[in-house]
Structures are given as structure tokens and as C-alpha cells.
Image (cartoon, rainbow, N blue to C red):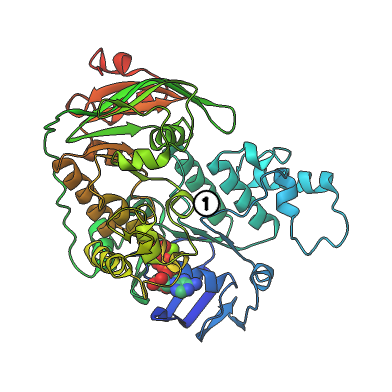
Amino acid sequence: MNTPCLVEMHGISKRFPGVKANDSVDLRLFAGEIHCLLGENGSGKSTLMTILSGLYKPDAGQLFIHGAPVTFHSPRDAIRAGIGMVHQHFKLVETFTVAQNIVLGDRKLSFVPNMDQVESALADLSRRYKLAIDPKARVWQLSVGERQRVEIVKMLYRGCETLILDEPTAVLTPQETRELFSILREMADQGKAIVVITHKLREVMEIADRVTVLRKGHKVAEYTRGSFSEAQLARAMVGKEIISRIRRQPSNAGEEVLRLEKVAAFNDSGGRLESVSLSVREGEIFGIAGVAGNGQRELAEVISGLRRISQGSIYINGVDMTGSSIRQRISAGISYVPEDRLGTGLVPGLGIVENVILKGYHTPAYSLGPFLKRRDALSKSMELVSKFNIFASSLESPVSMLSGGNLQKLLLAREFSSDPKLIVAVYPVRGLDIGATDAVHRLIIEEKEKGAAVLLISEDLDEVLKLSDRIGVLYEGRLAGPVNREDTDIEELGLMMMGASGEVASGGIGSC
Ligand SMILES: Nc1ncnc2c1ncn2[C@@H]1O[C@H](COP(=O)(O)OP(=O)(O)OP(=O)(O)O)[C@@H](O)[C@H]1O
Ligand SMILES: [Mg+2]
């Protein structure tokens, strides 16, 4: 390659207590390329990029920028050297405008910034990179995709030449993903180096000019465009052939478990869930497709009891649970896999054992009078860690130290192990590698086969079609459909996601 090497990471090692996250890793980034960084959960991708962005110091190895050795003491040093990182969890102040967020913490500005100048600089940047952004909008008003764009513009404003994005598409809709990719391509064409961490091989095939694969902290492969296939990448990541064994069995649906009758609820930004009726039976997976932000979170929250409804009724196994508490719903057999695994799902500062017993510590399984059955809690945790293949150096250290994928597996392990009658799963494989995704899909199908009713909320139409028996689509707070899996396809669901009702899109197939 004749293009200049912007960044070289040479022999980078980083150890955390009990694990070598990076082991003598080499990585080169060239101007003009989109470079995908791949690897299973916990393989060291985020650690490597966090080192490059100046947040962690490597134990060994050397960084070179434009061929010159550098040492970063903080992210500020990295930004000065032209390296910016967009983390998966954005760091924006919700009540500030876009422009205010962008200048926030910018040391170049030692005086009160002239916001007119800042805004015109931002307008230039958005023209140059074809990035639609309104500098005056307040961040709380923006969608996830728009917030991500603000983070990108912030890095461009600070002059970064290398932009790192850690799982940027995990939270985006298919349309937003497409927009993001065209922005990234534009940036690469203008001479920047872009690093994208992703688990989605289809995306890698679409955008990567080069790919580096990590496995257990080691670099195991590097490919250039045209020299790799999806199967090769999967093999390099896992070290063996991956064969998906997911086969959806036709539904053998039994009694009705969940029934929503004309449920309405308000959400935090003034939108709403409007007159949603649906029914999920034992042994059935009901998929809810749709672009996030159309009422998915609200739907999951009204069922789990986290959000009050303004109208309608909710029945579990024929019992009216409309006004009942979260704990009553848990006792009724509802398991909930929320979208924010480190907020609603798990407590970051607690260890694995505490998180495993979080919902059931007061039940006879873990308590004897006022005492906690510590040994039972410990053995249950060990059982789940091994069954769900959770990689953790200790059961006691805070779960915030687990990698993203391992966190999700822990959450699923807890929720699936209580013999649930109803599982409400919101984006259950977000952030998981291919092996773990396959494992989670198999577990969901297993639960269905054991007789659980499953409400699967997902933005990934392939996932919805692969697992669901019936499918509804949420659009602007209303539920279209449902349609039977056998009678629908990706085109019809796509239409429904844009507002066509199931009946219209399928010519009258939809029935509840
Ligand atoms: N701050 C930390 N303290 C202790 N251990 C850590 C810390 N950060 C990462 N680790 C450990 O280092 C290893 C690599 O983690 P890293 O987050 O880099 O993986 P990843 O490839 O980004 O995984 P994922 O795809 O799940 O996001 C994991 O075993 C993780 O538990
Ligand atoms: Mg990561």
C-alpha cells in the first residue's frame, strides 16, 4: 500500500487482574482506509483502541504517529496527535446544544467561545462530510443516530485524522447505519483513517478495506479487501468452523400467557404507545420488528411494570396485572432483558454473585429467614458462568469490568434461569459475537420449546424472521399486524416499518 501509514501500534500488551487483554499486538492504520477490528467478546478490541485513544497506558509496546514514536498520557494527548474515539456510550450533556457540546472541554478555547464562529465551523464540517447536523438543537431532542453524529463532528472539529468507532452500529437502525457508512466512506476518501469495531460480518464485507482479527488478546489475522469471506473471518475469530444450528420449529402454541388490550402509555419525550393489543401464547415467539424509538422500550417497560400505562389492560395467564408491581410481575414469571444492560439490567458496581441473585434474593432459593444462603448463591453463579460461557476473572469483582458481550450473557443467564413463563427480550444479541449470538438464539428457542411465551423485540429483521412464529411491527407507537412468519417476508416487514399496516401490506393476512 502506497498511502501513508498514519498510525502504527507495535507489540502492544496490556494486562488486567487475571487477564492479558492485549498480548503483543501490532496494528497499522493507513490514510484513506476503513479498517474493521474484529474478535469475539473479550478478545481485547476495546482495550486496544482505548490505548490508542490515550485513556489506558500499555504495559509494553510502542505507538508511532506518522512514523514518529509517541507516548500518550491522556486522551487530550491523543486528540492533539489526531486520534479521536467515539465510545459506545456517548458522553454528551443532554441539556446543552450540539454546538455547546462540541466545544465543551476543548482546551484550544481559553476564552469564552464565539458561538457564531463555532456554528459556522460546524456548518462547514457538515457540508464537507455530508453530515446533517443542527448546531442549535438540544441533545435530548436527538435520536441515537444523531447523537452519534454529534460525537463524530466533535472529533472532526478537534482535527482528528484517525477516528475510532466502538461498535457504532449496535444502536443504529438499518437506515442510520447506511447513513453512517456513507459518512465514514466520505471521511476515508478525504484522507482519514477510520477504525470500526463490529460484530456484524455483513457490515465488514460491505465497508472494510482492511480487517484485523483479535483472538484472546492476540492478533491472529490481517486481510485486505477482496481477500476474505464471511466464513474466513468467522473462522479466524473463533479458531474453528462455526455452523449455525438454528432451526425454527413450527409453533406448538398453548394457552395464552400475555395479553395486552388497547394499551396506551406516554414516553419521556412526549411520544406514546397507542392502543396496542397483542397476545402471546405458551411455546410461541412473538417478534416485534421496527425502527427503535417507535415505542419498543415503552412496550417492554409497560409489560415489566417499569412504566405506568394511561389506558388499557395487561393480563398474565388470565390474571389482570395492569396495576401490579414489578415484584408481583416477577413472581408471575416475567423475565425481562432490557436494552440498557448496565442500567436497568445489572448493577455495575456489584459482582456476578450479587447480580445473579438481585431479583431473587428474598426468595427461598437464596434466603433462610433474614440470612442469605451465600453458598447456594455462589454455586448458582458458578453454574451459570459455565453454562452460559461467561468469561470472568472473578465472581466477586464488579461486573462493570466484564466485556460488553459477557455482560449481556450474564443478564440472559439470570433471566433465563428462573424458569420464566414469559420472556420479554429487547435487542437480546446487541453487542454479542457470532458464537454468542448463536448461543442466545438457541437458548430463546429452547425456552420456547420448554413452553415459555417469548416477546422478542429486535431491529434486526433477519433475527426476527429467523426466530419468530408471529410478527408485529411497531410504528409511531402503533402495532401493525401481526402476520404469521410463514406468510411474510423481509419486503413486507420493511413496508410495515414505514407505516403500512399488516393487513395492507399482506393483503389481509394479519390477524391477532
Ligand atoms: N478496566 C478493566 N479492568 C479489568 N479487566 C478489564 C478491563 N477492561 C477490560 N478488561 C478485560 O479485558 C479483556 C478484554 O476486554 P475488551 O473490553 O477489550 O474486549 P472486547 O474485545 O472489546 O469485547 P466485546 O466484544 O465484548 O466488547 C476482557 O477479559 C475484559 O474482562
Ligand atoms: Mg468492546
In the image, 452: left or right of 36? left
Give the quarter of the figure containing the N terminus. bottom left
**x and y percentages locating residue 181 in the rendered image:** 48, 47
Residue 307 in sight from this viewpoint:
yes
Ligand 1 positioned in quadrant: bottom left
Foreground residue, 458 or 11?
Answer: 458
Q: Is residue 2 visible?
A: no
**323 on left or right of 454:** right
Give SS at disc 1: helix
Q: Determine the residue located farthest toward the right in the rendered image.
A: 111
Q: Residue 313, image x and y in percent?
A: 38, 22
Q: Position of residue 251 (x, y in %)?
A: 13, 33
Question: Residue 269, located in which quarter of the rendered image?
Answer: top right
Quadrant of the rendered structure where residue 192 is? bottom right
**Compared with residue 224, is residue 219 higher up or lower down, i.e. above or below?**
below
Residue sitting at x 62%, y 55%: 91
**Relative depth, front residue between 60 and 27:** 60
Which of these two is toward me, 380 or 186? 380
Which residue lies under the disc numbered 1? 184
